[in-house]
Image (cartoon, helix red, strand yellow):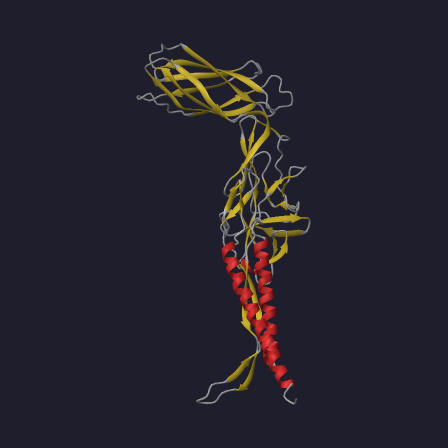
Amino acid sequence: MIALYTGVTGLSAHEQAVDVIANNIANINTTAYKAGRASFEDALSETISGGTEGTNPMQIGLGVTLGAIDPNMTQGSLQATGRATDMAVVGSGFFVLGEGDNVCYTRAGNFGLDGSNRLVSLANGMSVLGWQADPVTGAVNTSTTINGSSTINVPIGTRALARASSNVVYQANLDSNTAVGNTVDTSFYVYDSLGNSHRVDLAFTKTADNTWGWVATGADADPAVAPAAGTLVFDEHGQNTTPTAPCSLALLAPGGATSPIDFAVDFGSVTQLAGDSSIRAVSQDGLSIGWLESFTIDDTGLITGSFSNGMTQALGQIAMASFTNPTGLLRTGGNNYLPSPNSGVPHITTAGHGGCGTVSSGYLEMSNVNLAEEFANLIVTQRGFQANSRIISTADEMLQEVVTLKR
């Protein structure tokens, strides 16, 4: 009896649908979990008549099968955690995880630093892949290929930096009423390549109307080397027409540091107006030794470190992956995915580019399971299972009647 076996297919399909719903409910609090949806389709039909002109085909269905389990890849709500290493993808895209030759993809951004200061997934210990910044310049080359060894290191408390001065900016006024031959003195500090500070004494001497000469000396300067010197020329409005000048400090005892220290002095904000002379260096880009104290992650996944010497510098860039058909990805457990023939190959890029969304540091993406909707689906599926069981019991009663006909 066909109805008996048709009812069995209904029980099987609805049982599988309940399994999908149960899995959704079980993962209601799973980070970045994407709910699944069971879709049914009818099975092959028994054709009694193929139909003729004026009559329709006569077919009896042979039941139902589970046609597809479609993941719902819509955005989950964000939950604030306050941890800089926790990250959520806002929009499309996946983080890239790797360990050796194994690479997988995830939306779950519960990351942290391991004992080697690598950025890793706290769920499975796999490294978060991306691009490491140049330790000196902070430049990040995102054009290089990502593989399982493309780890990101955030060396909190372990990385020392020093940088020689290359630019000094002055902001001041030289009194236009100063007599020719008079001098105004000031000083500032620069750093050599090892982070040692050196005092530079700068003397401005008025040599003619609207013209001042300057000479840079210092206690650490080699007396055998002529000091750096130059001229500032001002127009009739008191504006400097020679805004930038090269300067060099030849060190007497470099101690292994680069000697001399070559830097540019920006005099663009120095004026010659009537009033007291007031001149000082407002900034210079050299740095003493510094230790990485903290870091932040912006919406592009760029990791920027803050050092004890006041410096900020890029440490690395987190990689993102996009797929032509993300619903075609293969779940592997642990909130991870692998490409399948229907997902397309991964396109590696940075957050905010190439179809990938942005990164929110200090947040985690929550499950997108709608609990009310799942319970409603559970009720409907339960009723469907119940109705199909009634088909089997009815078919059984009909068979029983057939068996008892000869009595």
Instruction: Looking at this view, name the residue that lies furthest to the left.
Output: 236
For the point 46% across and 88% down, the residue is 55
Quadrant holding the C terminus: bottom right
253 vs 332, nearest the viewer = 332
For the point 54% across and 15% down, the residue is 218
Image location of residue 80, percent across then percent down = 52, 41
Residue 29 in the figure: left or right of residue 212: right
Up the image or down, 229 lies above or below 391; here it is: above
322 vs 220, nearest the viewer = 322
- Number of numbered markers: 0
Image location of residue 174, percent across then percent down = 38, 16
Quadrant holding the N terminus: bottom right
For the point 60% across and 35% down, the residue is 135
Up the image or down, 269 lies above or below 29; here it is: above
Up the image or down, 300 lies above or below 70; here it is: above
Viewer can see residue 57: yes
Determine the image quadrant of residue 64: bottom right
Up the image or down, 201 lies above or below 64; here it is: above
384 vs 253, nearest the viewer = 384
Viewer can see residue 370: no
For the point 46% across and 20% down, the residue is 281
Determine the image quadrant of residue 15: bottom right
Residue 74 in the figure: left or right of residue 234: right
Image location of residue 162, percent across then percent down = 59, 27
Image location of residue 12, percent across then percent down = 61, 69
